[in-house]
Image (tube, rainbow, N blue to C red):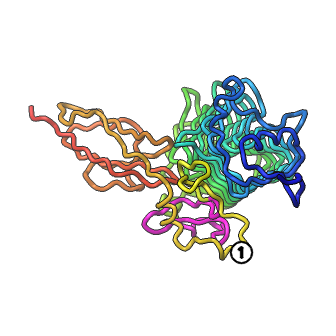
Amino acid sequence: MGLGTVDNPYEIWTLGELNGIRHNLDAHYKFKDNIDATETRTWNDGKGWEPIGNWGYRFSGRINGDGHHVYGLFIDRESESQIGLLGVTNYATISNLGLYITMISGFEQVGSLVGFNENTPIDKCYVVTTGGQGVIKGKYSVGGLVGGNTGTSSEISECLSEVEVLGGLDSDSLGGLVGYNDLSGGVFNSYAIGNVTGDYAIGGLIGRNKSTLVNNCYAAGIVTGKDVVGGLIGENTYSEIRNSFALNSKLMRRDWMELTFGKVIGFQSFDNPTNEISALDQMQVPEGVLTGIHGTAISFIQARQSGSYVDWDFESIWVVGESSNPSYPHLRRINVIQNAGTGGDDAVMHELELELESIDELEVESPVVEHEELVENVQKPIAAPEELYFEGVLEVFITTTTPGAIIYYTLDGSEPTEESLIYEATIYINETTIIKAIAVRLGMNRSDVLEVVYSLSKQ
């Protein structure tokens, strides 16, 4: 249905209609329902979804998700480039669309939504995991939402990514939201919380950032790399960073190489202006060459208070929990619900509160309670060994099955909180010890408390 025009766009109700966009790349489209794409795992001899648009035939139309999502998207094309739901865009518009992905794999310019995005604004879009599992894999210019982003019209605003981004040997320009952001319209009011692992120019939000603006953004995933690694941005060149935060629990060294790192920016090529940039004071960082930008220290408690975010709009864009279940800021108009499915009254939906006549229509009087009721719990930590009696010195390991969760623990029997010790390595004990631990992941309810007593046997 529809005519493909601005006023009467083609309607997208089914996976087949979504796939049909490739036959009319300059038309206008509007989603009318959530799309189940789980069957794409078996398409094209196991390669999955074929990206819409390429270098020869770029997508230049308009897609309005209208608060709907595509669920279970799968792409396995590790030797191909410009990989995503859309391969290449040029002077298009994308808005109000969510993606639940299992795996998206490519070589260069890989992202869940767009592989290579040129002169195309992206507004209120998100990518999250399917059933707690979701990864973007590639070698060059790989991002959770967009692989490569360029062109003065390519502004990314009010977007988020919670998926893992993973690069192989000699991978370059990997970011939680955008891999390579060059001469673009900027990134605004967006965040990424998935872990990012690669070799060079690795950032929690953006891998390489050149000649553009980043404003009111943050990253919170664990960032691992060989060189030029930053909690927010790996390498920053001729670009201004304003009012942005690195809230990562740690930066990690991928191998023996010395790491050039910064808590906020790994390496700044030139004297780029920065304003009100901060990093978590308890962020764990490896030893290395301190050439990056570390920003002003901010505590866990401060990071959960709206007053810490200068010039952020907490009336219409952001919301932060400050009561019994404090949280980092999340986007007011994107309410992430884990394990979303497709249509039907019994399905759990992942909806956007969009296109309201006024902000007063947003029901946000108790955003924390709503969030707590709708998201799933982080899995309770597990301790090993199972044997509770020991002699001499005991090595204790703690883990959780929830990807990306951070474990906090105590050794004195007190209740663990997010101010407790972060589990980073094996715990060694030589006396009877009560270990308590919780696991925490942004966007999910914290886990139940693990309690285990290891007793020193009498000789």
Q: Position of residue 335 (x, y in %)?
A: 59, 59
Percent x, y for residue 247?
56, 52
Quarter the C terminus occupies: top left
The residue that appears at 59% across and 35% down in the rendered structure is: 197
Q: How many marks?
A: 1
Quadrant assignment, res 200: top right
| 324 drawn magenta | yes
Amino acid of disc 1: Ser
Residue projecting furthest to the left: 459
Q: Is residue 54 magenta?
A: no
Position above or below: 457 against 315: above
Residue drawn at point x = 67 percent, y = 70 percent? 316
Q: Residues within 10 Å of mark 1 (few under 14, many from 20)?
A: few
Residue 92, image x, y percentages: 86, 49
Q: From which residue to which does the magenta span run? A: 305-334
Q: Is residue 59 left or right of residue 39?
A: right
Question: Can residue 142 be spotted in the picture?
Answer: yes
Main secondary structure type of the part rendered in magenta: loop
At 50% from the left edge and 43% from the top edge, which residue is drawn? 404
What residue is pinned by disc 1? Answer: 358
Q: Is residue 187 visible?
A: no
> Height in image: 151 above or below 428?
below
Q: In front here: 360 or 50?
A: 50
